[in-house]
Image (cartoon, rainbow, N blue to C red):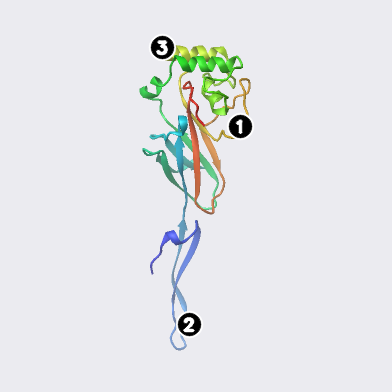
Amino acid sequence: LTWNYADFDPGVYHLEAVAQGGGLAPEAVVAETVITVDAHITGTVSGAGSAPLSDTTLRFSVEGDEIDAAMTDAVGSFTLRAPPDTAGQLSFEREVTDADRNEIGVSDALDALRLAVGLEPSWGPADAADFLAADFNADGSVGVSDALDILRTAVGLDTESQPRWVFGDIENDIVDANSVPVLNNELDIAALSADTQINVQAILVGNMENYV
């Protein structure tokens, strides 16, 4: 018997081996087993300008127990397995590198300041990702203090707040300088009965780019 997992949707399958009776002998189940076909969560993580983001760690957990983990490859892609018909959480993590810090410059501070005083950033109308990138101290708003901290970071001075990566589904959020969502770098995943694809936006806070 050949079992090709690709031919089956995610789920739990019961497999029985039956011996055929001869003459008056009845059929009999001589072996049985349960086979679970996991669902797969695939997708990409992208950064500024929709560029692929490598070296991001993703974890799928159920009620706090880690089920699977993966890291994005050079093109930002990942694949995780998930138990069928089981809801869970997908979390994201990426360390801030020296190369990331070097992406934060004086112009980023100026764009954050423009948002703080009600002006558009240098590239045009702002969206939710821009306000998230400017909220350097993660207090849910964009103010002059955020712009100053970004400036201090750009010129190599110490700040209480530090650059960080945030992840989440932000395309449908409507925000302004006084109402910026605080992302917890986690997505809720509904119970899966089929493979699913998820594309996630990553933002380096302090790096003011046209992300989306």
Residue annotated with mark 1: 173
State how far apart marks 1 and 2 are (Cα): 65 Å
Cα separation, mark 3 vs mark 1, equals 32 Å
Q: Indicate the quadrant containing the N terminus: top left, top right, bottom left or bottom right.
A: bottom left
Q: Residue at x 55, y 23 (%)?
A: 124
The answer to whether 146 is drawn above or below residue 84 in the figure is above
Q: Is residue 176 above or below residue 4?
A: above
Badge 2 amino acid? Pro
Res. 160 in view: no
Secondary structure under the numbered disc 2 in the rendered image: loop
Residue 155 circle label: 3
Q: Nearer the viewer, mark 1 or mark 2?
A: 1
Give the amino acid at mark 3: Val
The residue wearing badge 2 is: 26
Q: Between residues 12 and 74, which one lies in front from this camera angle?
A: 74
Residue 49 vertical position relative to residue 110 in the rendered view, above or below: below
- Give the mark nearer the N terminus: 3 vs 2: 2
Q: Nearer the viewer, residue 6 or 60?
A: 6
Residue type indicated by callout 1: Asp
**Element at label 3:** loop
Q: Is residue 43 left or right of residue 118?
A: left
Mark 3 → mark 2, Cα distance in angstroms: 84 Å
Q: Residues within 10 Å of mark 1 (few under 14, many from 20)?
A: few
Circle 3 residues within 10 Å: few <14, some 14–19, many ≥20: few
Secondary structure of the residue carrying tag 1 is loop
Where is residue 158? Give x, y as percent. 43, 12
Residue sitting at 47 percent across and 42 percent down? 60
Q: Can residue 176 be seen here?
A: yes
Is tag 1's residue or tag 2's residue first in the polypeptide sequence? 2
Which residue is at a point 41% across and 38% down the rendered structure image?
A: 76
